[in-house]
Amino acid sequence: MMCRSAEQPDPQDTGGDATDVLFAALLEDSADELYESAPCGYLSALMDGTIAKINSTLLGWLSLDREAVVGRMRFTDLLTVGGKLYHETHFAPLLRMQGEISGIALDIKQSAGGRMPVLVSAAVKYGSTGQPLLTRTTVFDARDRRAYEEELLRRRDAAEEARKQAEADRARLQEALAVLQQSLLPDTLPPIPGVETAAHYHTASPDRLGGDFYDVFPLDGKRFAFFLGDVCGKGPQAAAVTSLTRYTLRAAALHDPDPVSALSTLNTVLHERYADSGDPRYCTAVFGTLGPDPTTGHVAVQLASGGHPPVLVLRADGTADFLPTPGGLLVGVVPGARFTTATTVLTPGDTLLLYTDGLTEARTGDDQSDRYGDEALRGFAVRHAGRPPDAVVQALTGLLHGFGDGLDDDTALLAIGVPATGPAPCDPATPD
Amino acid sequence: MMSPLKTTVRETAAGPVLEVTGELDYTSAPELRELTATITLRPGLRLVLDLGGMEFCDSSGITALLAARSHAHAAGADIALAAVPAHTLRVLRMVGLDEVFTIHPDRESVIGS
Amino acid sequence: MDVVRRNNVTVVGNPEGPAVVLAHGFGCDQNMWRLTVPALVEDYRVVLFDYVGSGRAEPSAFSEKRYSSLSGYARDVVEVCEALDLRDAAFVGHSVSAMIGVVALGMAPERIGALVMVAPSPRYVDDDGYRGGFSADDIDELLASLESNYLGWSAAMAPMIMGNPDRPELDQELKNSFCATDPDMARVFARTTFLSDSRDDLKSVAVPTLVLECTQDVIAPREVGAFVHRTVPGSTLVTLDATGHCPHLSAPEATNAAITDFLAGLR
């Protein structure tokens, strides 16, 4: 390509002459001159690396005299130590095998102790019988380019570091949340002679600590206590209330197992802790005791409710009904709150079902505008009445899965039953 | 589908009336709590929460209503719920708050038309 | 995983002949032996492979933990020998592979019957009374050099790693590709290689050993060759009139002659 940008005079007047002069000037640009002053470094070396020829441009970059280099130095002598290692382990073997190599990033040493980033390409010249004679190498100034690449690499490293940090943070947070969540619920339910229990906890979001809780624990060797409830709200604040609630109810019950007494203690604790905090916190809860009678196999249930949906009793005969506890107040709202009690007796094949309103408030219908509701739950319970607790909880877990996105709240389930003595009832023909 | 929460406040001689429409749940309850905290009350006034347009209220919503109650009582003022929808009334009864709140079945009887 | 596939194992030559395992060093892969193989195929069963993290070995088999010590690479050697059921094989290791061979010999003495150490160095970094030729800073600079050649690598190597059967023309465009290695894995190999110290292991080598050194080798200077010869009991030292660290490429005839003479002496 010819360069015309230097053409100063008006081409209309003197165009022919000027072009000729310019062209003549280009012809006078000898090959030697081009070699010496090219905008890149040239170097030829014998196969043992000894430099046989080098151009002025490269000497200028190295600040070395030709006499000090030609016949005295090898190409690797021009490189930094790291560059030497790279040359010996990558560059030289590749050049031998391929006969050429291109675009390798190396640093050359400058006399003042500095270094200059360069891009190096090389090709082997072969003799007529194919034997390698010498190596021709071109060296390009890569200072700007390398600075740019280093910036890219630096940013990539920084981004990678930030990503790793974020991942570690997230993992640590998830772990902390999981540990906290586990502290709110029992690992396993204790064995109770003559009684079967089953529980399930559905977390609406793994990132969001739940506010539902349940527990079963022994009282005095004969009796056992159970509770299930729902702290208003979610997240860490709700979890703190859940924790306080769980351990308050456990401690209160050991002191006085009467259900109303346990809920009243909890009411006092929550009210005193939160009423004046500017961030009032409440919960609904069912608390009860189980009194198994080893002679009859019956289990007497005494329970009290503070604002919690009524528990369901699934009977061996295939019926299911709510055990109403109307008028019991949300726990923690006012001092001296009133709680409503109820009693029942579980005989073989009966199951008591406690749940939180995540179940009954699940969105249903094509546009998710309806709620599952109490009556639908009772109907479901009828279809599973007579089955043991784990089967009932398993069926309800399937129901919860079926809600899909419609289940947007945490849901706790706790079933307590007396094993049937006779043959197990048949499974319903069309399980839900 | 879910309808967003909307709130409007208007002043009457007897006190402010806060009209709540839409769904009051975990995501929207903080909005109502922040709003009620900014309402100025004094002894003798009554804050009325007009729930006629409220389509849903869960436990977080109940907490927001109780926060409004605490806010009113702290100022020495009274609080009442008006036009409570049947669903919410059932929830309020279940958690025993029908005995904690003054509840009026319609808005006319408590705030006039 | 199938070791033969994992290490890209190639077996050529005389199936009835004694086995010779050719192990590449840091910076390249089994292609390094292209001028050596022809000298061996007539008489020997020649086994070539790539270490995991190099050449066309299975990249998914790489584990930074395993390959952060020479014993990780030595396990590759032992597993290749086991996969082919080699016994008393002659192990020819270039550069760091010479030391990997020593470690593998310690792990499975029944597999390796002789060692050829091509330009070996048991320690590259200078130490009290020992001159390896490099300082710790030099090694850091090498790691930086690997990093600066990253961009060139990714453009050349990505299609090969990912497999691109729809665009076979990419294979032809690849330059500098013989020794292309994933830069992250190469960095691990470089660190493991240049920070290793296997001087003590040399004393326990109890098989016939040939040490090949070059007259002009920046990476393994002649003092190091002399040290290895002195320390490995009964070893033979041959100094090749060759420049650089890869005599099997720069002086193949002399290198092959030294290796075949040694191997012939074992029979």
Image (cartoon, coloured by chain):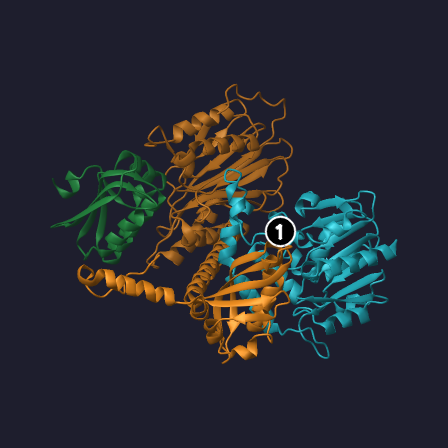
User: Would you place residue A194 above or below residue B44 in this image?
Assistant: above
Give the residue type at disc 1. Answer: Gly
Q: What letter labels the chain drawn in orange?
A: A
Q: Position of residue B85 (x, y in %)?
A: 26, 36
Q: Position of residue A66 (x, y in %)?
A: 52, 77
Determine the residue positioned at 41% across, 34% down: A324
Task: Give B30 or C136, whichever is nearer the viewer.
Answer: C136
Q: Colour of chain B?
A: green
| Res B94 quadrant in image | top left
Q: Quadrant of the N terminus of chain A?
A: bottom left
Task: Give B91 or C205, whichever is nearer the viewer.
Answer: C205
Residue ranking furthest to the top? A429
Q: Colour of chain C?
A: cyan
Secondary structure under tag 1 reads loop
User: Would you place residue A270 above or below residue A140 in this image?
Assistant: above
Q: Report which residue position mark 1 lands on.
A: C55
